[in-house]
């Protein structure tokens, strides 16, 4: 039995959910569940457990209003206004509108990242609902921090557990995005003063599954504390290359009405920017 098959065999049994593993190390499709309907306590608990084990969940053919999307997020945690800087839906201020169009800003979401990991307490996850899609392209990929950690040689993995990573918004492309907007430089300087670099353990343990994972990403992780610049860069480069291994990833081809829900701590994700000048618009709720 492969390591991935063994891992799936250790997952709990689900009574309410029809679950199909999406790829060996990460992801699951859940069938025959209408997220717009009120979910009973057992179903909600199974969804939370499924997310803990599979890291990202996919649902097709979902018709959600912004308010219903917020209620879906509430199954997994407390919906909140994310500290990213996307515009918000006029229908609900907890819904961010992530839109790429020829005359709009380039958000650099194609870079591997965990959402706003530069915060002192990064969000646990998010619910993303497809609204407008290009004729082709615009896929999103997720990669497993569990799989990356578990693939490391034992000695290296143990050494990494002693390290702390520095996360900073300055590492990202947000500075260029914000400066291109009216009053953007002043706004960005205010953000830097409000969001100084933060320290996060490089290796963390999931509270439900007990599995360890790497918490670092090339968009926001600037360095490893206590190492020389060269050693820090080399080690982060090694880890980021592991996230790019195809066998650790799930790649989603969106359809209208598709919903993706992911664990923002145990995964990194990236949106493929291969569809311009077409428009792509998503609604996101963070929890």
Image: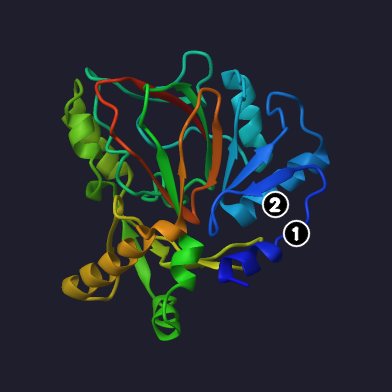
User: Which residue is at 65% across, 35% downward?
Assistant: 74
- The residue that label 1 is drawn on is 12
From this view, report whether residue 235 is shown above or below residue 93. Answer: below
Secondary structure of the residue carrying numbered label 1: loop
Q: Earlier in the sequence, mark 2 or mark 1?
A: 1
Farthest residue, direction top: 90
- The residue that label 2 is drawn on is 49
From this view, report whether residue 162 is shown above or below residue 95. Answer: below
Disc 2 from disc 1: Cα separation: 8 Å
Farthest residue, direction bottom: 155
Q: Residues within 10 Å of mark 2 (few under 14, many from 20)?
A: some
Secondary structure of the residue carrying numbered label 2: helix
User: Which residue is at 49% across, 49% downward?
Assistant: 264
Asked if residue 10 lies left or right of residue 109, the reply is right
Which of 207 and 100 lies nearest the eye of the viewer? 100
User: Which residue is at 28% across, 33% downward?
Assistant: 274
From this view, report whether residue 239 is shown above or below residue 217. Answer: below
Q: List x then y, in percent, for residue 51.
A: 62, 49
Give the label, 2 or 1, closer to the camera: 1
Q: In which quarter of the image is the C terminus?
A: top right
User: Would you say the residues marked 2 and 1 are in contact, meaning their CB atoms lie under 8 Å apart?
Assistant: yes
Using the image, tell me which numbered label, if any, was put on residue 34. none
Q: List x then y, in percent, for residue 246.
A: 40, 57
Asked if residue 105 lies left or right of residue 143, the reply is left
User: Which residue is at 30% across, 45% downward?
Assistant: 111
- The answer to whether residue 74 is seen in the rendering is yes
Q: Which quarter of the figure has residue 165?
A: bottom left
């Amino acid at each position: 039995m492969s390591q991935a098959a063994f891992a799936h065999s250790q997952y709990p049994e689900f009574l309410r959910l029809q679950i199909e593993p999406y790829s060996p190390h990460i992801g699951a499709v859940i069938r025959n569940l209408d997220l717009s309907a009120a979910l009973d306590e057992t179903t909600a608990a199974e969804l939370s457990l499924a997310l803990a084990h599979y890291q990202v969940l996919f649902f097709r053919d979902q018709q959600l209003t912004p308010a219903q999307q917020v209620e879906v997020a509430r199954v997994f945690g407390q919906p909140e206004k994310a500290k990213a800087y996307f515009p918000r839906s006029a229908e609900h201020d907890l819904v961010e509108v992530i839109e790429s169009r020829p005359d709009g800003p380039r958000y650099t979401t194609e870079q591997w990242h965990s959402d706003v990991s530069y915060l002192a307490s990064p969000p646990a996850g998010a619910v993303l609902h497809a609204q407008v899609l290009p004729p082709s392209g615009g896929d999103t990929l997720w990669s497993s921090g569990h799989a990356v950690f578990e693939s490391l040689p034992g000695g290296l993995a143990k050494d990494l557990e002693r390290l702390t990573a520095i996360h900073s918004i300055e590492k990202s492309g947000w500075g260029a995005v914000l400066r291109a907007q009216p009053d953007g430089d002043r706004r960005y300087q205010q953000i830097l003063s409000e969001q100084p670099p933060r320290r996060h353990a490089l290796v963390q343990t999931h509270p439900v599954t007990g599995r360890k994972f790497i918490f670092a990403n090339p968009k926001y992780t600037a360095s490893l504390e206590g190492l020389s610049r060269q050693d820090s860069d080399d080690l982060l480069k090694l880890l980021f290359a592991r996230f790019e291994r195809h066998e650790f990833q799930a790649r989603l081809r969106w359809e209208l009405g598709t919903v993706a829900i992911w664990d923002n701590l145990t995964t990194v994700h990236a949106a493929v920017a291969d569809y311009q000048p077409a428009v792509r618009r998503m609604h996101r709720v963070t929890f």
